[in-house]
Amino acid sequence: MGIVCVVTNDGFLLSSAPNFRDLGGHRTKDGRTLRGGLLYRSDALHTIAEHDLPAYQGFGIRQLIDLRTHHERDRLPDVVPEGAEYAAVGVQDAEAAGANFVELLADPERARAMFGDGAAERFMLEVYRALVSDTEALDGYRDLVERAAKGPTALVFHCSAGKDRTGWGAALLLTLLGVDRAAVTEDFLVSNERQANTDHWMRQLSKDSQLPWEDVEPMTRVRAAYLDTAFAHIDELYGSFDAYVADGLGLSGGTVEALRDRMLD
């Protein structure tokens, strides 16, 4: 029996996790289609409300991959679907500057020093460079791809806002599957319409730190320049995306083929 995806009146699969969405339906450059109901991306999954639980359980998720740092996981543990395997797969140095927003909320002076006067956009560009070069990121994204290739599926992977760490994970998987860059970027930018949960606590950061919203806003949304920066950094470090996959992530050709066989019609 197939999975039935019920879209709520607000257009979301889960209103309490607005960036939860199915990557199925994307077309590859060679005319294949990513199967629906196998690969989901999401924002935080500790937020699942009682009214969303039947739908959440109904997706048949068998593997949940949590890309958050231990600070986030410990403070806000996921709601794990019945029968699903849970895996904590960090992709970011948990002690890096800005990685723990709970600490920043409690330290307004530090937040002002880090993100005032246009520094937030520069910070975000550095985040995306790190997502394709830091050891934690290389290890974590290799693990994500290998888990997606091996199964079990359906699988959901997520971070807090579902836009940066998850955004690069989705871009990586879609590119490996053969989706063209324009469609990858389009999927990436969809997150901008789904940040109600993020806005809540980022507006608190803005208020507590007395930072103008325009100084904070670059961290609450995604921009094509962020994704472009990641791909450009790959070219700088590895020469090509294929070299990044083989030499940076250490993924075998067999793993990539298994991913395609599992995910594509």
Image (tube, grey):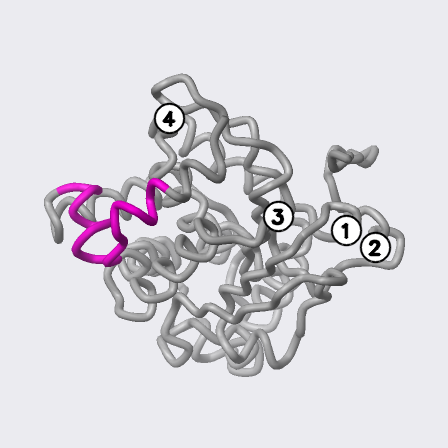
User: Of helix, strand and loop, which mostly describes the magenta segment?
Assistant: helix
Disc 2 residue crowd, few under 14, some 14–19, many 20+, Cα 10 Å: some
Give the mark nearer the N terminus: 2 vs 4: 2
Disc 4 versus disc 3: nearer the observer: 3
Picture coordinates of residue 175, whole percent (x, y): 35, 37
State the residue lying farthest toward the right.
51
Residue holding disc 1: 56
Query: Do callouts 1 and 2 mark residues in contact (Cβ within 8 Å)?
Result: yes
Magenta stretch encompasses residue 25? no
Picture coordinates of residue 13, whole percent (x, y): 73, 40
Query: How far apart are the alpha carbons under marks 1 and 2?
Result: 5 Å
Q: Which residues are magenta?
A: 240-257
Disc 3 residue crowd, few under 14, some 14–19, many 20+, Cα 10 Å: some
Disc 4 versus disc 1: nearer the observer: 1
Quarter residue 165 falls in: bottom left
Disc 1 residue crowd, few under 14, some 14–19, many 20+, Cα 10 Å: many
Residue holding disc 2: 53
